[in-house]
Amino acid sequence: MNKFDGIIFDIDGTLTATNELIFSTFNHITEKYLDTTYTPKDVAALFGPTEGTIIKNLIGENFDEAFTDYHDYYEANHNDLADAYDGIIQLVENLHNSGVTLSIYTGKGRRSSEITLKEIGLIDYFDMIVTGDDIKGHKPSPEGIDVFIETFNIPRERVLMVGDAPSDVKAARATGIKIASVLWDAYAKEEVMKMGSDYYFHSVEELQSFLLS
């Protein structure tokens, strides 16, 4: 019997190792349009709003061109700079095949989210995809969780959020579901460890054993 009827996954740092790609893509844009580059820490500090909002704030009047450049570079370099974590594809397939309703809730924009999910071959396994473009605010808003629960009418005690960031913990807490914090590539690992998540997992194998045993 499945421990949960619905599972909501974050993307970056949870399903995919995309940080290097994201940092490289942002620097492609800032170098081209602002003649500067950012450190990974500087780029990570921008996270929260979607790429579109961040680029608009940084670039201004050249936003449309920069936004197109961002996604062209992101897609063209995806296979070289990003991939699913070992075991993630099998985990998602196994959950899907066992009848669990699956969703994405990410702060990424819809275009980059769909690029990543298509590139790693998982887009068809998710019953719902909620991105930063689909909600009024951004994580840690619980809106992306609530719309999933309301759409599929799953009791909150049977829903799990799986993510790597403090915003995932806050979003889950705000809407009363359990949170599994994954630590295999968390950029804010120390902060997440202090937040008292319901579950912590250091490897995909640990997560799969918990969810499917």
Image (tube, grey):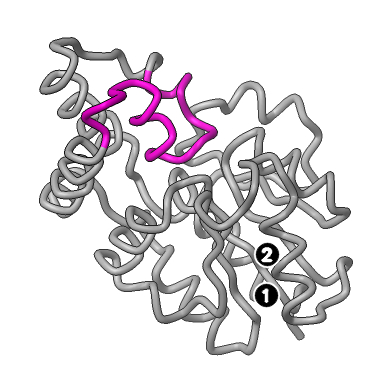
Looking at the image, which is closer to me, 110 or 83? Answer: 110
Image position, residue 100 (x, y; %): 65, 82
Q: Is residue 162 left or right of residue 39?
A: right
Q: Is residue 167 left or right of residue 86?
A: right
Q: Is residue 16 left or right of residue 167?
A: left
Looking at the image, which is closer to me, 71 or 67? Answer: 67
State the residue at coordinates (49%, 71%).
91
Q: Quadrant of the N terminus?
A: bottom right
Q: Residues within 10 Å of mark 2 (few under 14, many from 20)?
A: few
Highlighted range, magenta: 43-63
Circle 2 sits in a helix, a strand or a loop, which is it? helix
> Tags 2 and 1 in contact by the CB under 8 Å rule?
yes
- The residue wearing badge 2 is 210
Q: From what the image shows, is residue 175 above or below residue 69?
A: below
| 55 is within the stretch colored magenta | yes
- The residue wearing badge 1 is 213
Image position, residue 198 (x, y; %): 80, 47
Circle 1 sits in a helix, a strand or a loop, which is it? loop
| Amino acid under disc 1 | Ser
The part of the image, by quadrant, that contains residue 171 is: top right
Q: Quadrant of the C terminus?
A: bottom right
Looking at the image, which is closer to me, 37 or 207? Answer: 37
Image position, residue 5 (x, y; %): 75, 79
Q: From what the image shows, is residue 17 above or below residue 148?
A: above
The part of the image, by quadrant, that contains residue 60 is: top left
Q: Is residue 182 left or right of residue 198?
A: left
Looking at the image, which is closer to me, 1 or 26? Answer: 26
